[in-house]
Image (spheres, grey):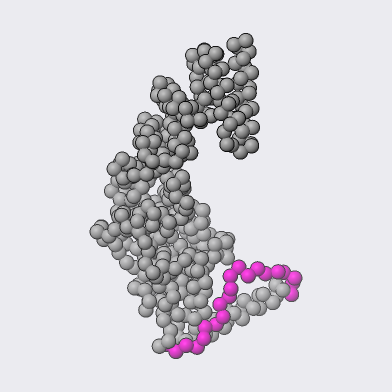
Amino acid sequence: MLTDRKMRIGFADKIERMTSLADKLKALGVKTANTFPIPPAPSPLGRADRHAIDSVVAGRFRLTPRGEAFVAEQTFDPTYRHGEASPYFASSLSLISQWANDVRLAELPITQFAFLDTETSGLAGGTGTYAFLVGAARFVDGQFALQQFFLQDPSEEPAMLEALIDFFAPCNALITFNGKSFDIPLLTTRYKLHRIPVPFKNYAHLDLLPLARRLWRDRLPSRALKYLEEHVLGFTRASEEVPGYEIPWLYFDYLRTQDARPLRGVFYHNAMDVVAMAALLSHISRVLADPYGCLAHGLDFIALGKLYEDLTLWDEAARLFERGLELELSEADFGAALKRLSILQKKRGNVDQALRLWEQAAENGHIYAHIELAKYYEHKKRDAPTSLKWAKSAHREALRADLPVYIRKHWLEEIGHRLARLERKVG
């Protein structure tokens, strides 16, 4: 650890170099942007008044080829529950691997998965943004082992990146939440800036955010990790949790004061994000393995049915849609699900079932059902009079339905073309 005098001198030198550079750029007419504040030199606190990071969170300093890195460590045993879910997932990831289009996710053992989340100096991205705290976890000897790599000073970044290499060495897959858009590009940039090989370059990568959107966008107003944690997993964080937008400023305060106590909540926030990812993956894999034993909301069945349909698993998708329609849904959601199921039945060649669904929807005033029936009788049955009857009823529904102007125009134009053609045929 640096002495107080060395720390103050080091900070003074950094500020002098930064000021000098800013003055030179200003003299040349170059405008500089204040991406984030330059912390002033720390006040000359006595050693008893300072609170180093290792006195606030449990961890140790790890020696790397590029210097020392501080790493906080904790483990979660198999009895740990994150709300209603466990970080330990026993169900197959085969369907998830099909959805992600990466067979490795289904083939790799659980011990080769790494869960990762970063806390950064800002959200703008680019070379001016760096990760000052990286939380990473994997399964080691039957334990979910979490390690958090922390920058006491930005100058320690190469050492932190080297320490991460050792952590990632046994792994071949990454699990993140919005990591494909943010965390991984950011870390890749930092590795390249320091001319250090990227340790996860060829890993399989599952980003849980797009999958969460597929499963819950119709039912939940937010798909943020903390919201899913509360409303899907049933877990509420402790009072030491800090909002994400405060985290960069708490770190800048730490650089200024060298008081690590406010960072305890940042470490907690990061740890819960990483554990929540593992618990969410465990929950999703269990839902996919046994949806009828896990789900209770109609929209969840409908969303899962859409996912199965996209994977061309049409029989199971139809069963999921049918189960969702049996549960409580709003009129709009019921109509949309019924439409989806009827079209799916048509794809499957189950025309009788599709007809029944279209007739049911037509009775409830759904325009699409009248048009589907008109199509069926015109093209499949070659029955132009009956098709014309359904096209006329579709026109009446479009005129009296409470629709936005552009939607009404779309329906009336489509139906008008169909009516003209059918009237010529019947003529």
Q: Tell me the magenta residue range.
A: 27-47
Query: In the image, is residue 96 above or below residue 54?
Result: above
Q: Quadrant of the C terminus?
A: top right
Closer to the camera in the image, 116 or 288? 288
Q: Is residue 204 left or right of residue 17?
A: left
Q: Does the magenta run of residues contain 111? A: no
| Left or right position of 23 against 119 | right
Q: Nearer the viewer, residue 135 or 409?
A: 409
Quarter occupied by residue 92:
top left
Q: Residue furthest front?
A: 400
- Residue 308 visible somewhere in the drawing: no
Residue at 57% from the left image edge and 65% from the top image edge: 128
Q: Is residue 130 left or right of residue 265?
A: right
Q: Residue at x 64, y 18 (%)?
A: 420
Magenta segment main secondary structure: loop
14 shown above or below 82: below
Residue 42 inside the magenta-drawn segment = yes
Q: Quadrant of the N terminus?
A: bottom left
